[in-house]
Amino acid sequence: MRTIEYLSIPELAEMYFQAALAGLAVVTLCGVLSVFVVVKRLGFVGQGVSHAALGGVGVAAIVAAFGLIPGDGTSAAGLWQWAIVTAFCVLSAVGIAAAGDRRALPFDTAIGMFLVGSMALGAILVQIGRETATSRGQSGMTQSWESILFGSIMGTGLGDVALAWGACIGVLLVLWGVRRPLLFWGFDSATSRAFGVPASGVKYALMVLLAVAVVTAMRLTGVILATALLVLPGATALRLTGRLWPSIGFSVGSGVLALLAGLVLSIETDWQAGPSVVVVQCVLFVAACVAGWLKGRMVTGKGPIIRA
């Protein structure tokens, strides 16, 4: 197997294990949130927030043009850029939630507005930032916006691993702190209001956590995998069980399995790592659908039941 040969080379093995460590943090973070994303039908939020990140890239370009943050490709510059993009995405998520609270504006319409508006703003700001940097004799942001938005999981370093696990632990701690009102609102929002649960506050908190998860996953794995990890694991888990804690376990488990199998698949086939992980996750979802269908047939007695 090419994977064994790959891991026998120290430099390549180090790259693989760093990618796996960072990926484990991302799939754990997204796997827990994915159940709530599917239950509350927020799958389009990940797409909207990830594309809204281009607006944050534009803001970072303007700030770098005035020399307020480093614009080169160093780790310090990357951390500053990630912080600005994260802040912009969090504000976008809060704006989406606020706009979606208005009954005259459907939630998916609010997401679409922020998506296209942020992308347009980001494209303009990136151009202005480059022109400003040139006129001021500054280097500006030399790293391309494509490399900021479309990360590669196989290119992660120890700093990325620490960042991923820091974001994962932080989000999970917040989720644990708000777990009771979040669960009540997530599975019965109408009744939760009658029992005094601050539905709007819980919704805003979830949107902020989703924004942090999307930006972290996007930085390490790219836009496609970031969106997929917020939808597919939860959808896979809910095909197998309708109970909360088992569904979260299945969601995280399917994400971990897809990550490890996807990395092996990418090595064996020379495919890109991110799409390989998505392909495996899609296969797991189809398998879960088949397993759920067979389980339903066995329970209703309409299908063949194999007994020992």
Image: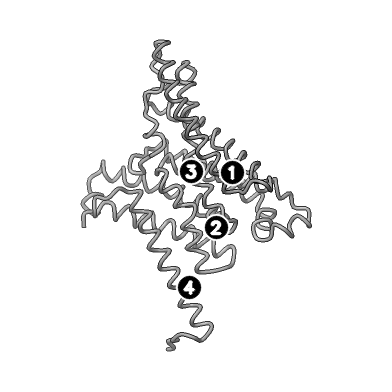
Q: Amino acid at mark 2?
A: Val
- Of labels 3 and 2, earlier in sequence is 2
Point out the frontmost of discs 1 and 2: 1
Point out the frontmost of discs 1 and 4: 1
Secondary structure of residue under mark 2: helix
Residue on which disc 2 sits: 38
Assess whether mark 4 and mark 1 are in contact (beta carbons under 8 angstroms).
Answer: no
The alpha-carbon separation of the residues under discs 3 and 1 comes to: 31 Å
Residue in the image at 69% along x and 57% along y: 189
Asked which quadrant contains residue 269, the reply is bottom left
Does residue 74 appear left or right of residue 100 in this picture? left
Dot 1 alpha-carbon crowd within 10 angstroms: few under 14, some 14 to 19, many 20 or more: many
Residue on which disc 3 sits: 165
Residue 266 got which mark? none
Residue on which disc 1 sits: 110
Q: Residue furthest top?
A: 136
Assess whether mark 2 and mark 4 are in contact (beta carbons under 8 angstroms).
Answer: no
Q: Amino acid at mark 3?
A: Trp
